[in-house]
Amino acid sequence: MEHLAQHFGRINNKIPPLSDKINGLAKRLNKFASIEPSYLVALEKWRVEAHKTVEDYYESKRRDFIDDRRGKLEKEVERVRHTMDRLMRKHDAVQQDIDLLTQDIRLIEQKFSEFQSLRFTIHPLVIDGDLIIRDIFPLPPPCRTMKLSFDEFPAMASNDKYLLVHQPPNLSL
């Protein structure tokens, strides 16, 4: 009976150190939640840069398709307006001037109509799922080891996804 009590005593004495370990892990986990790890900082930096890339692309396309065309139309309108003002001040317009002004105004109206009815084919942004991948190195510590001779089985390490195999002269993952 005394032997049994000693046995249970030894087993029960192992519980407090295990409790200390789990409490220590809980503290580390809480601290981890309050401190942003470097990989999350890098991920956030990547996100900000990706958004900036999309914004820059948008602004470039907007300039190409909208702002440049509108600027050209505004210059054309100002040129025709300036010509009309000059002709009205001098009172020396001839039929050819009127015909040219009428033609210029029609061209501006046509360009404005085209500008208003621009159509685009916009493809959705496709993001490769493997754009960001987790490095497998450093590998986590092994959860189990087996003693095998290399003659029987050449595996060196494994996790849930990978098996590291040594078959001289190659090391394969």
Image (cartoon, rainbow, N blue to C red):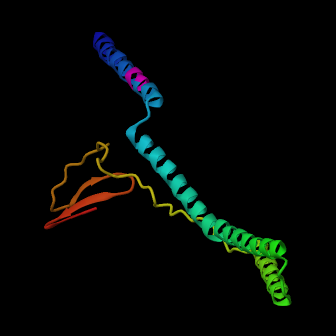
Asked where in the image residue 10 lies, by quadrant, the reply is: top left
In the displayed structure, does residue 156 sit left or right of residue 132? left
Q: Is residue 59 magenta?
A: no
| Marker count (numbered) | 0
Measured as percent of width and height from the top left, residue 135 is found at 35, 52
Q: Is residue 145 left or right of residue 76?
A: left
Residue at left offset 51%, top offset 48%: 48
Relative depth, front residue between 61 and 88: 88
Give the magenta part as a residue range: 23-27
In the displayed structure, does residue 150 sit left or right of residue 68? left
| Quarter placement of the C terminus | bottom left
Vertical placement of residue 49 versus 71, above or below: above
Position of the N terminus by quadrant: top left
| Magenta stretch secondary structure, dominant | helix
Q: Which of the pair 8/103 is nearer the observer? A: 103
Quarter location, residue 14: top left
Res. 88 image quadrant: bottom right
